[in-house]
């Protein structure tokens, strides 16, 4: 199903985002501002 595929992709993006935050803590503020903007 298309919906399930979208959910899987979003889940992967979330995991990647979390990993990026852990690997680059000094960029956290930038990502937070980005998320609030969208």
Image: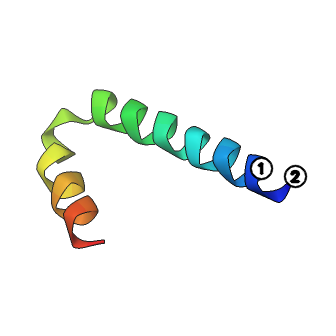
* Distance from Cα at disc 1 to Cα at disc 2: 6 Å
Residue 6 in the image: state x and y as whole percent. Answer: 70, 54
Q: Give the answer, above or below, for where 27 lies relative to 35.
A: above
Q: Give the answer, above or below, for where 31 lies relative to 14.
A: below
Residue at left offset 18%, top offset 44%: 28
Figure quadrant of residue 37:
bottom left
Q: Which residue is mark 1?
A: 5
> For the residue labelled by badge 2, is the local secondary structure a helix, a strand or a loop?
loop
In terms of depth relative to the viewer, which is nearer, 2 or 24?
Answer: 2
Residue at left offset 19%, top offset 53%: 32
> For the residue labelled by badge 1, is the local secondary structure a helix, a strand or a loop?
helix
Taking 12 as reference, is 24 left or right? Answer: left
Taking 28 as reference, is 18 left or right? Answer: right
Residue 7 in the image: state x and y as whole percent. Answer: 65, 47
Figure quadrant of residue 34:
bottom left
Mark 1 touches mark 2? (CB < 8 Å): yes
Residue at left offset 58%, top offset 49%: 10
Q: Quadrant of the C terminus?
A: bottom left
* Colour pattern: rainbow
Q: Which residue is mark 2?
A: 1
Q: Residues within 10 Å of mark 2 (few under 14, many from 20)?
A: few
- On residue 38, the disc is none
Q: Give the answer, above or below, for where 34 lies relative to 26.
A: below
Residue at left offset 75%, top offset 55%: 3
Q: Give the answer, above or below, for where 13 lies relative to 21.
A: below
Residue 35 in the image: state x and y as whole percent. Answer: 27, 60
């Amino acid at each position: 199903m298309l919906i399930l595929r979208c959910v899987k992709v979003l889940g992967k993006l979330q995991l990647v985002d979390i990993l990026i935050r852990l690997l680059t803590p000094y960029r956290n503020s930038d990502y937070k501002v980005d998320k609030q903007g969208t």
